[in-house]
Amino acid sequence: MGWIAENVESIKSMKIRDTLSQLITLGMIVSTALIIWKALMCLTGSESPVVVVLSGSMEPGFKRGDILFLHMSEAPFRAGEIVVYNVEGKQIPIVHRVIEVHEQENSGKVDILTKGDANDADDRSLYAYGQSWLKPQQIMGRAVGFVPYAVHTCRGSRSAGYNLEGLSDRVFKA
């Protein structure tokens, strides 16, 4: 009987070891993902360096499920750029094109107006109550690359493709 009891204890301890090993591996994977995300934040200057297009408001340039890569530089904003911005009181960022930029030379104040390519009107109705223009502080980043159909590909409904070069030729036509 002593031999059976020893083997049972050995098997129980192996399960605990396996469970601990799996938990440690999971912790390392999560930690690595967070480190990569923070590194991307530092490299791109954007609080969210990767976003997914959630609506059809930027079609035909971007479709639902496309993944955008963002970068935030010190360069002034210009009409025609694709930006991702946050609106006060709303949790989901919006991907739209800059259609107007007003810069006051004496004060350095910048006002930005955006619009979705597939929308008939500008985004003033999406901004916070009483706000007619975006401020540069509300912009999370500029689109610098994208992976089309990425989310659809994960679900297996479309074929994958990617295009990080020539983004402005295909998408940024005003």
Image (tube, rainbow, N blue to C red):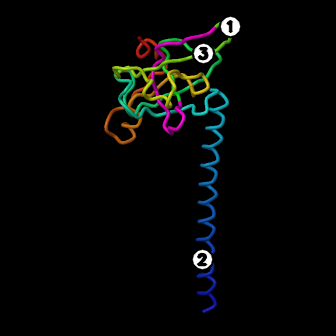
Instruction: Categorize mark 1 by other alpha carbons within 10 Å: few (<14), some (14-19), many (20+).
Output: few
Residue 45 forms part of the magenta stretch: no
Separation (CA) of disc 2 from disc 3:
66 Å
In the picture, which quadrant includes the N terminus? bottom right
Kindly identify which residue carries mark 3.
110
Magenta-tinted stretch: 86-104
Tell me the SS state at disc 2. helix
Disc 2 vs disc 3: Cβ atoms closer than 8 Å? no
Instruction: Categorize mark 2 by other alpha carbons within 10 Å: few (<14), some (14-19), many (20+).
Output: few
User: Any mark on residue 106, and which?
Assistant: 1
Tell me the SS state at disc 3. strand
Q: Which amino acid does label 2 sit on?
A: Lys
Q: Position of residue 106 (x, y in %)?
A: 68, 7
In the picture, which quadrant includes the C terminus? top left
Q: Which of 39 and 160 is in front in this view?
A: 39
Kindly identify which residue carries mark 2.
12
User: Any mark on residue 115, and which?
Assistant: none
Residue 88 forms part of the magenta stretch: yes
Q: What residue type is labelled 3?
A: Val
Q: Which residue is drawn at 43% across and 11% down?
A: 169
Disc nearest the viewer among 3 and 1 = 1
Q: Which of 58 and 2 is in front in this view?
A: 58
Query: Which tag, 2 or 3, sits closer to the chain's start?
Result: 2
Q: Position of residue 159 (x, y in %)?
A: 34, 32
Instruction: Categorize mark 3 by other alpha carbons within 10 Å: few (<14), some (14-19), many (20+).
Output: some
Q: Position of residue 103 (x, y in %)?
A: 59, 10
Q: Residue at x 60, y 43 (%)?
A: 33
Separation (CA) of disc 3 from disc 1:
11 Å
Q: Nearer the viewer, residue 141 or 20?
A: 141
Q: Residue at x 54, y 34 (%)?
A: 88
Q: Along the horizontal axis of the image, is 101 left or right of 160?
A: right
Query: Which tag, 2 or 1, sits closer to the chain's start?
Result: 2
